[in-house]
Image: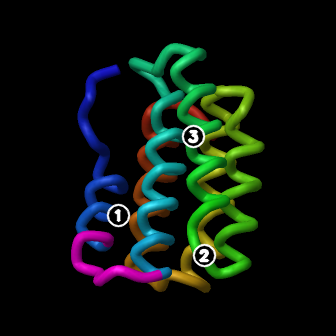
Amino acid sequence: MTGTTSGGEQRLVALAAAETRGPRRDGLFALWLVVRAAEGVLPPDPVPPAAHRRRVQSIGTRVGALALPGPLKRALSAACHHLEPATPEAAVLVLRQLIAPTRDVLGNDAADAVTHAARGARTRGVGR
């Protein structure tokens, strides 16, 4: 793992930083966590399986504690479930499936960041 952030992650961090406290910022934070976990299993340097499992468990706990709109909370919970196998294919699936609920709840800018992450996953050789 290189420790660098992707373009999608950087966009989500910037959007969250621009928000004041509240459900929208919480949603952006939770979305960033899921995108980070999904991108963490992608080549060329995936995180170790044990670290990925801890990351996904932590996200599930955090998402459950945040005050998020229902559609986003359900999408993020489903994403955690789909990420459990820690495969690149699962990561691409999760990123693609998060675009629509993100657009509905958090708006176009956040959805564009997730779209960017999904495209990045495809260019890394998976999900074709």
In the rendered structure, the answer to whether residue 72 lies left or right of residue 43 reads right
For the residue marked with disc 2, what is the amino acid? Leu
Circle 1 Cα neighbour tier, 10 Å, few/some/many (<14 / 14–19 / ≥20)? many
In the rendered structure, the answer to whether residue 121 lies left or right of residue 104 reads left
Q: Residue at x 41, y 59 (%)?
A: 116
Residue 68 is labelled as 2
Q: CA distance from mark 2 to mark 3?
A: 16 Å
Q: CA distance from mark 2 to mark 1?
A: 16 Å
In the rendered structure, the answer to whether residue 67 lies left or right of residue 2 reads right
Q: Could you tell which of marks 3 and 1 lies nearer the N-terminus?
A: 1
**Helix, strand or loop at mark 1:** helix
Q: Could you tell which of marks 2 and 1 lies nearer the N-terminus?
A: 1
Q: Do the CB atoms of the residues marked 3 and 1 lie less than 8 Å apart?
A: no
**Helix, strand or loop at mark 2:** loop
The picture quadrant where one finds residue 6 is top left
Residue 24 in view here: yes
For the residue marked with disc 3, what is the amino acid? Ser
Which numbered mark, 3 or 1, is in the foreground of this view? 3
Quadrant housing the C terminus? top right
Q: Which residue is mark 3?
A: 58
Circle 3 Cα neighbour tier, 10 Å, few/some/many (<14 / 14–19 / ≥20)? some
For the residue marked with disc 1, what is the amino acid? Leu
* Magenta extent: 16-22
Where is 22 relative to 44, above or below?
Answer: below
Q: Could you tell which of marks 2 and 3 lies nearer the N-terminus?
A: 3
Circle 2 Cα neighbour tier, 10 Å, few/some/many (<14 / 14–19 / ≥20)? many
Which numbered mark, 2 or 1, is in the foreground of this view? 2
Q: Which residue is mark 1?
A: 12
Q: Residue at x 62, y 63 (%)?
A: 98
Q: Do the CB atoms of the residues marked 2 and 3 lie less than 8 Å apart?
A: no
- Picture coordinates of residue 61, whole percent (x, y): 63, 48
Q: Residue at x 76, y 54 (%)?
A: 78
